Amino acid sequence: MKNMSEMTIGCALWTLGATPDVASLARQMEIAAEIGCTSVQPWIVDFEYRPCILDPEVGSAADRTEVLRIAKSLGLSFSGFCAQLKGAVTYGGLEEREGLRWRIDKTKKALDTTAELGSDIVSTHAGVLPEEKTDPAYQTLLESVGEIAEHGARVGVYFAMETGQESPQALGDFIDEVNSPWLKVNYDPCNLLKFGSEAGTIQGVHALGDKIIHTHAKDWNPDTRQATCGEGLVPWDGYIQALRDIGYQGVLAIEDETGNEDMIESITRSYAFLQGYLND
């Protein structure tokens, strides 16, 4: 395999569960470091994986300072944070009017906290992108994401929309319409494979190009329901090569979300699989 030393391997920490206190987050970071990861992406909102110690409504500034100290002591950086919320109907809900102001403000606060912790990326599924631009929900999503991206420009944090049910081309067109250099993509090949095709998963990398600022390393096997990297249907060789082709130099953050019986062992297998791409 070709050398891809310009990329690094990290871990999406919610794979290991909620982080209600500093001790639990510290233990998760220790596990990631012991496996060999050089970065972690923690949860940063008190929603779904809760309580969340990094949410300012749960933890204190002193808590966050201690988490930062522990990460540095372990040789870990924060590749970014996840601020996933939900609307009444959709995952993300930034296209739903009900409760919208709370979701926008909560996300903006997550960007503030990310800057406080010395990172510059917040990822989320923003919502369902309507196929028709005339759909009122499209305009709502445009306004919501645009406002968050504007806030990101003020605090120096990128807002990364995670690939989901829409095509990469549609997502790229939407980002172009928002027209902010602070709006980027968190690329998840597994999500695209579920709702698209193997070819589309690879072609999507080229379609989005330098909009990709962060990725999740996740696999998908509809038979076993397991998500250990290299044991599913994601076309890793073609996908990794596509990332090289566009000059991606960011993280491959392991996200194992299917609840394997031994999550640490599964993440370790994913790490070993991805590590194979770092070697000649």
Image (spheres, helix red, strand yellow):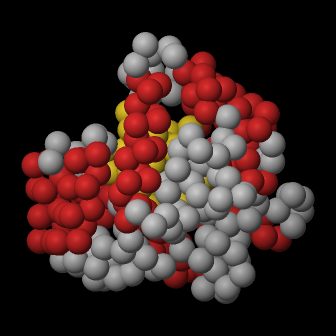
Q: Residue 94's image quarter?
A: bottom right
User: In the rendering, at what x and y percent does residue 219 appear?
Assistant: 60, 48
The answer to whether residue 277 of the structure is visible from this angle is: yes
Give the mark count.
0
Residue occupying image coordinates x 15% and y 48%: 74
Q: Residue 8's image quarter?
A: top left
Residue occupying image coordinates x 72% and y 57%: 222
Quarter of the image where the C terminus is located: top left
Residue occupying image coordinates x 11% and y 71%: 62
The answer to whether 273 appears left or right of 190 in the picture is: left
The answer to whether 67 appears left or right of 187 in the picture is: left
In the rendered image of this protein, does residue 185 appear above or below residue 205?
below
User: In the rendering, at what x and y percent does residue 85 appear?
Assistant: 54, 74
In the rendered image of this protein, does residue 249 appear above or below residue 41?
above
Residue occupying image coordinates x 28% and y 40%: 36
Q: Which of 231 and 93 is in front in this view?
A: 231
